């Protein structure tokens, strides 16, 4: 529980955090596109089934997926956590 005097401030900071997280996610997506281009050159194909077998690209995909998953978790749980609700 954050406390009544800080609730508007906490909600504002939460929204800013989510906006910045989404901006970071977009930047990581841009990075992922460049990693994919390198993978396409390494495997000699632009086909998704071929490119995803590239170990470096596969690692990059996992990082990107984890970032997106945690963004969703933050968005869905942050307000409840602020209210003092845990799991």
Image (spheres, rainbow, N blue to C red):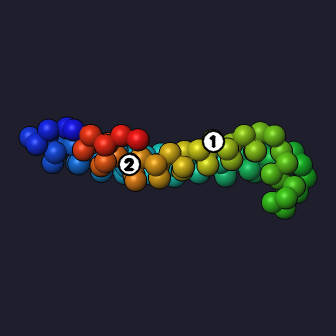
Q: Which residue is mark 1?
A: 63
Residue at 85 percent across and 58 percent down: it is 49
- Left or right: 55 with respect to 13? right
Residue 33 spot, x, y in % from top left: 67, 52
Residue at 10 percent across and 43 percent down: it is 4
- Left or right: 21 with respect to 46? left
Compute the Cα span from label 2 to label 1.
Answer: 21 Å
Residue 43 spot, x, y in % from top left: 89, 49
Q: Give the mark nearest the N terminus, 2 or 1.
A: 1
**Secondary element at tag 1:** helix
Q: In this rendering, does residue 16 appear at all?
A: no
The disc at residue 16 is none
- Residue 67, quarter of picture: top right
Q: Residues within 10 Å of mark 2 (few under 14, many from 20)?
A: some
Q: Quadrant for the N terminus, please.
A: top left
Q: Which residue is mark 2?
A: 77
Along the line of sight, the residue nearer the viewer: 41 or 22: 22
Residue 76 spot, x, y in % from top left: 40, 53
Decide: marks 2, 1 in contact (CB < 8 A)? Answer: no
Q: Residues within 10 Å of mark 1 (few under 14, many from 20)?
A: some
- Residue 85, quarter of picture: top left
**Secondary element at tag 2:** helix
Q: Which residue occupies the extreme front position in the image? A: 87
């Amino acid at each position: 529980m954050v406390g009544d005097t800080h609730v508007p401030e906490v909600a504002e900071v939460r929204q800013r955090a989510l906006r910045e997280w989404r901006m970071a996610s977009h930047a990581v997506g841009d990075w992922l596109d460049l990693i994919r281009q390198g993978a396409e050159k390494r495997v000699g194909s632009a086909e998704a089934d071929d490119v995803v077998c590239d170990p470096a690209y596969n690692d990059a995909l996992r990082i990107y997926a984890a970032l997106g998953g945690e963004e969703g978790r933050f968005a869905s749980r942050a307000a409840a956590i602020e209210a003092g609700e845990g799991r």
